[in-house]
Structure formats: C-alpha cells, structure tokens
Image (cartoon, rainbow, N blue to C red):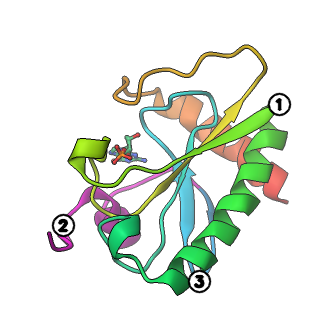
Amino acid sequence: MSYDPNNIFAKILRGEIPCHRVYEDEVAPAFMDVMPMVEGHTLVIPKSPSRNLLDAEAKVLGQTMAVVQRVALATKQAFGADGVQIRQYNEAAAGQSVFHLHFHILPVRDGESIRPHTGTMADHGVLAQHAALIRAALG
Ligand code: DGP
C-alpha cells in the first residue's frame, strides 16, 4: 500500500489542521493525541512521509526515536509518571488507523490503568493545559 498525503497527520504537518504541539525540530513534531489513553498521551510523527515503520527509512527511524526519547522523558516528568509506554501500530490489522508513521507516548503512574486505544475525544482546554505542562518540562 502506498502513502496517502491526505491522511490527517500529513494535514497537521502542513498546518491545515490544528494540534496541541509540545515540541518540534527538523525531524519531527510532537503533539497531544486527541483521544488520550492516559493523561499526557503524546504523539511523535516524523516529517518524512511513510505509512508506518514498515516502509520508513532506517535513518528517519533513528532520528525519530531520539525525539521520542526526549518527549518521553518530558511527559514522565510533567505527569509525575513512574514509567512510559511507547506504542506503535503497523497497518489496520495491527490497530493502525492513521497511515502516517507515529509513536504513541504514554506516561503511566504505578497502578494506573490505560484506556482502550479507540477512546473518546478529550476536552481541548484540558489538552492545551497538558501540552503546556510538557512544554514546560522540555524547557
Ligand atoms: P493509530 O493509527 O491506531 O496508532 O492511532 C491514531 C491516533 O491518532 C489515535 O490515538 C487518535 C489520534 N488522532 C486521530 N485523529 C487525530 C487528530 O486529528 N489529531 C490528533 N492530535 N490526534 C488524532
């Protein structure tokens, strides 16, 4: 299957759709997931187009993981989490619904349960507050 440049994350990258951005460099932006599985659920998406990990360039994967690590540390600090889960889905059969490579960052506290992947839309005011916490942690 080929890359569709009209997917929702490509539109976010082009600035056609708003998002609650927490970070951006030449490799990848990070922004709040609108259907968070936990408080602070953030997405990192490389600027370079690929459907998912399976068709991404190895160099892009390496560069993107450095951003994932940086944002993971910030979400952990911002939400007082005890750990961070990284999730990434490849193709619909494996749970992928947006076909531009992305990494889910889930800061998790001890004993906290993670909501289902296909959740409900969060309040935008709350997402804005959470994004501000992560930006502050990023310094
Ligand atoms: P998946 O492709 O299954 O890894 O999940 C896509 C995720 O993207 C899902 O957690 C919900 C989130 N999402 C879907 N549409 C939007 C959107 O327009 N903006 C943002 N920020 N997140 C979105």
Q: Considering only order in the chain, which callout, 1 or 3, is on the residue closer to the N terminus? A: 3
- Report the residue at 33% width, 58% height from top: 17
Could you give the CA–CA distance between mark 1 and mark 2, rounded to whole angstroms? 37 Å
**Total number of numbered discs in the rendering:** 3
The C terminus, quarter of image: bottom right
- Report the residue at 55% width, 72% height from top: 28
Q: Is mark 2 in CB contact (under 8 Å) with mark 3? A: no
Q: Is residue 118 left or right of residue 69?
A: left
Q: State the image coordinates of residue 109 (x, y, percent, origin top left).
A: 76, 24
Label 3 sits on a secondary structure element that is loop
- The picture quadrant where one finds residue 41 is top right
Does the segment drawn in magenta span residue 40? no
Label 1 sits on a secondary structure element that is loop
Pointer 1 local density, CA inside 10 Å: few below 14, some 14–19, many at least 20: few
Q: Nearer the viewer, mark 1 or mark 2?
A: 1
Q: Which mark is residue 82?
A: 1
Boundaries of the magenta span: 1-21
Pointer 2 local density, CA inside 10 Å: few below 14, some 14–19, many at least 20: few
- In the picture of the structure, the residue carrying the numbered disc 3 is 26
Image quarter for ligand 1: top left
- In the picture of the structure, the residue carrying the numbered disc 2 is 6
Could you give the CA–CA distance between mark 3 and mark 1, rounded to whole angstroms? 30 Å
